[in-house]
Image: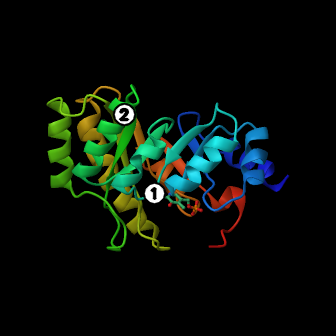
């Protein structure tokens, strides 16, 4: 019951305009099933192999979000079913997703991941790289991709002013492109530790794991 309760508490405080992705990485199927029974349909994973095993085992009306760093050679495994790829952090990856989407006769929704944190361990594009990819997209280079927006992770810190300013940078870039690109409507920012701030700063999708499923044992 703990999972269902956590979900309902979270959802009560969430504006209608904000989508909740339940981040279930490392968690067993039983935990996802409990969340599913409580009505949760959007799940986030950060490893393609694990996500594919869960996709095979669970009901087919689940929307699967790939939120992790994606290796190009593994895109093919998720291409048939993935709902949204959050971590597009290089041109080569976008090309591969486009190619695999084509092979599967579909288009795949993607977010471009920006590097907004101070830690240099977090992946992502800088403003110049972002613009380059968006120009190529607008020029029609990725016919099997639908760019839906941006994703980013703030620095892991208790300094709220810093987190706010990093989210503000992402929101700014999002607003720049929102009116230029059709269907560019998703700003994926906010996790268990910082989602209230992210929502304040304009997030439309939060990725929450430990707050729903409890701490992870790696
Ligand atoms: C693990 C993860 C989350 C969820 O983290 P919590 O702190 O458990 O909510 C969100 N986004 C990404 C990209 C992650 O890898």
Q: Is residue 206 left or right of residue 29?
A: left
Q: Quadrant location of ligand 1?
A: bottom right
- Residue at image x 54%, y 54%? 49
View extreme (right): residue: 1
Q: In the rendered view, would you say 213 is above or below 64?
A: below
Q: Nearer the viewer, residue 53 or 32?
A: 53
Q: Is residue 146 left or right of residue 81?
A: left
> Which mark is on residue 101?
2
Q: Is residue 51 left or right of residue 74?
A: right
Q: Residues within 10 Å of mark 1 (few under 14, many from 20)?
A: some
Q: Residues within 10 Å of mark 2 (few under 14, many from 20)?
A: many
Q: Label 1: which residue? A: 68
**Which x, y percent locates residue 102?**
33, 30
- Residue at image x 33%, y 42%? 97
The secondary structure type at the circle numbered 1 is loop
**Which x, y percent locates residue 116?**
32, 62
Q: Is mark 1 within 8 Å of ligand 1?
A: yes
Report the mark closest to the observer, 1 or 2: 2
N-terminal of the pair, mark 1 or mark 2, is: 1
Q: In the rendered view, would you say 149 is above or below 196?
A: above
């Amino acid at each position: 019951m703990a999972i269902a309760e956590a979900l309902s508490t979270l959802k009560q405080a969430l504006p209608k305009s904000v989508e909740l992705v339940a981040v279930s990485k490392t968690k067993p199927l039983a935990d996802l099933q409990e969340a599913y029974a409580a009505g949760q349909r959007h799940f986030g994973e950060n490893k393609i192999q694990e996500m594919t095993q869960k996709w095979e085992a669970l009901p087919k009306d689940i929307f699967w979000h790939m939120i992790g760093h994606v290796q190009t050679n593994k895109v093919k495994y998720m291409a048939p079913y993935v709902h949204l790829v959050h971590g597009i952090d290089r041109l080569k990856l976008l090309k591969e997703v486009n190619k695999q989407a084509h092979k599967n006769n579909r288009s795949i929704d993607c977010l471009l991941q920006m590097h907004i944190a101070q830690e240099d361990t977090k992946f992502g594009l800088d403003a110049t790289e972002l613009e380059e990819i968006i120009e190529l997209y607008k020029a029609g280079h990725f016919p099997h991709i639908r760019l839906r927006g941006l994703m980013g992770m703030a620095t892991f810190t208790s300094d709220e002013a810093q987190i706010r300013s990093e989210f503000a940078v992402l929101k700014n870039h999002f607003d720049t492109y929102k009116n230029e690109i059709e269907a560019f409507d998703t700003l994926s920012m906010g996790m268990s530790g910082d989602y209230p701030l992210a929502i304040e700063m304009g997030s439309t999708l939060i990725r929450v794991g430990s707050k729903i499923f409890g701490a992870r044992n790696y």
